[in-house]
Amino acid sequence: MRQKGSSTGYVFFNKQRNKWNAQYYEYNVKTGISKPKTKSFDAEEEANKYLSTIMYQKENPIYIKNNGIPICEIMKSDLKLKYDTNQISATQFSRVSRTIQSVEKTKLGKKNIDDITTNELQEEMNSFKHLSNSSISKIYQLYSRAFKSAIDKGYLIRNPMSNVIKPKSTKKDKIVRALTIDEQQAFTDYLLQKDLSKCRYRNVFLIQMYMGLRCGETLALTTHDIDLRSKTINVHRTLTMDENNQVIMGETTKTYAGKRTLPIPNQIYQYIIEQMRVAESKENNEEKLLFKPDNAKYTRRTNVNSELQRIMERQFGITDISTHSLRHTYGTRCIESGMAPVVVQKLMGHKDVSVTLNVYTTVLDKFKQAEIDKVNNYYMAENLIPSNEDKLLER
């Protein structure tokens, strides 16, 4: 606990309020005056943690000199700056915060940044090999950015991360697969036999599987987004998470290309109408959400995903399918039907056609020979390729 009267800030117990206070000074550049700021907490540990965080954010040189610079405080400070300057969303802020919390629990997470060596960093990174490659990359980037920031601020003169090699995971990369045609038919038959009271997310699954929406986009739909006259759905928002990991309505879709108007397939038209009627009859549904839960403001994507996985395993013995697989199923059927990738890109809301090509490489390869045969047949029909007999005569 810092002593009261310290110019860097301090923590003290307020007997009247039965609270621990963290007090620090905020300097006003225009007036040249420092004013005290106070925040209350239930526990002393929370107050101390807040004080240290705020000191590093304000780059208080006296405090840093006396207390050192824990690497995780650099990570938090950089993350908060990105969030405050609107460079990352609340969802990204929450996701990275959870990763930093994991790093804090490690041996290096408790050390000051100027005490950490290259060998320690390599050993630390190697200890994450049991995680996915995606998780390893996120942690590696956190450390890299923290040391770069420390050098930029003059805390360090050399970067120990420069010689650290990012290890490969011992896990196989998780591949999101699509349902086969037979699996899709079987799942569709199962859903259409179920009443909504017995399968509450039935129409979520149908929209994803036959229109290619992301789960968050589907759950963000309102009755106002449905145009029954033109048989279209306007996709322009998605459910997301705030910095406290609470579900909120996003102002836009996952990417700028995600905003799109999609035709409603005849196969699910009646189920869209059914869901609209359910939504209109719901109480406390001021937003007219198409999928309004009974006991919450918004539906959590994790709940939908869990329900899908239960059905797939219980009914079909399938354990590698998620809600994203349903969206992937739609994209796969589009490619299989011969649809041009650039059209698939627009329907799926990919920001670039290269994303579409990368995601559906396997499907495209499968039909590559058939497309090549079309070109060769065209050449033959137009006499652009000499026959084998002509070639032999030329010799």
Image: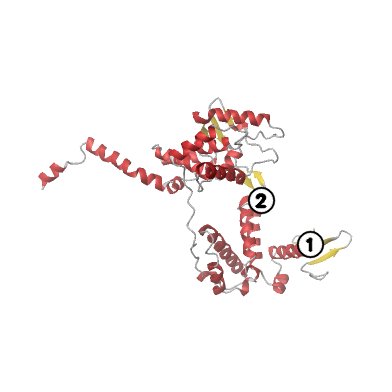
Side of 41 where 252 appears, left or right: left
Q: Where is residue 333? Give x, y as percent.
A: 43, 39
- Describe the element under mark 2 as helix, strand or loop: loop
Q: At x 73% / y 64%, what residue is drawn?
A: 49
Q: Is residue 216 visible?
A: yes
Which residue is farthest top?
Answer: 229
Q: Is residue 89 visible?
A: no
Q: Position of residue 215 (x, y in %)?
A: 57, 42
Q: Amino acid at mark 1?
A: Ala
Is the N terminus in the top left, top right, bottom left or bottom right quadrant?
Answer: bottom right
Residue 223 placement (x, y as % from top left): 62, 31
- Residue under numbered circle 2: 245
Element on which disc 1 rests:
loop
Residue at figure coordinates x 49%, y 65% from the top left: 167
> For residue 43, which numbered disc appears in the image?
1
Q: Is residue 370 left or right of residue 236?
A: left
Would you identify the image quadrant in which residue 25 lies?
bottom right
Residue 155 quadrant: bottom right
- Which three-letter amino acid code belongs to the residue tagged 2? Asn
